[in-house]
Image (spheres, rainbow, N blue to C red):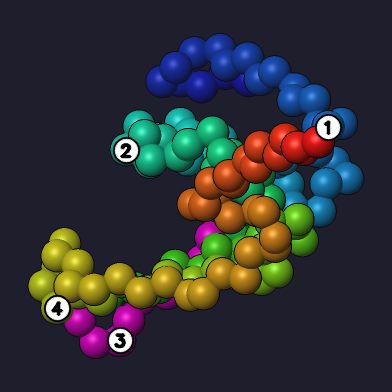
Amino acid sequence: MADPEFGEVDIVPCDVKEIQNTPYGIPNFWLKAMCNNKEIARNIFEKDRAILGYLTDIQLDLHEEGYGFDLTFHFAQNNYFKESQLKKSFFMKVEHCVDKAVGCTITWNAGSDPTKTMKKKGKKKVKV
């Protein structure tokens, strides 16, 4: 196909076999997108990656008053927490200045909360 401004343009066909039967499109799209943004990536730790692999969509809702907004994170069913949506609200009276941020409560499955560390119990020695 010739374009008068750019000349000849080659269009390479894309192999879509990997994603054609995927219900949510590109696998791990949001994880890849966040890890490729330097500002966001520095806040994603290795233990977060497995959880973010279940993220299927992010929805933005602007508040009617002020400059605040809500972010709703949609997740596929997973072994980490019970909810399918997690919401965080940002309240701002002045543009670019967050007054308060409120997140929903997450119902973590046993041993799945990445903010908690598991303590290993040592074996007790048996006295004879």
Considering every residue shown, the one lying at the far left of the view is 94
Which numbered disc flags the more N-terminal residue, 3 or 1? Answer: 1
Instruction: List x then y, in percent, for residue 97.
Output: 14, 65
**In the depicted structure, whether residue 103 falls above or below residue 20:** below
Q: As shown in the figure, which amino acid type bears the numbered disc 1? A: Glu
Quadrant housing residue 100:
bottom left
Q: Nearer the viewer, mark 1 or mark 2?
A: 2
| Observer able to see residue 4 | yes
What residue did someone put label 4 on?
Answer: 93
Does the residue at mark 1 contact the one at mark 2 (Cβ under 8 Å)? no
Which numbered disc flags the more N-terminal residue, 1 or 2? Answer: 1
**In the depicted structure, whether residue 47 falls above or below residue 89:** above
Q: CA distance from mark 1 to mark 2?
A: 29 Å
Which numbered disc flags the more N-terminal residue, 3 or 2? Answer: 2
Horizontal side of 106 relative to 14 (left or right) equals: left
Number of numbered discs on residues: 4
What residue did someone put label 1 on?
Answer: 18
x 65%, y 42%: residue: 121
Instruction: List x then y, in percent, for residue 17.
Output: 87, 31
Q: CA distance from mark 4 to mark 1?
A: 45 Å
Q: Nearer the viewer, mark 3 or mark 2?
A: 2
**Which type of secondary structure does the marked residue at label 2 adopt?**
helix
What residue did someone put label 3 on?
Answer: 64
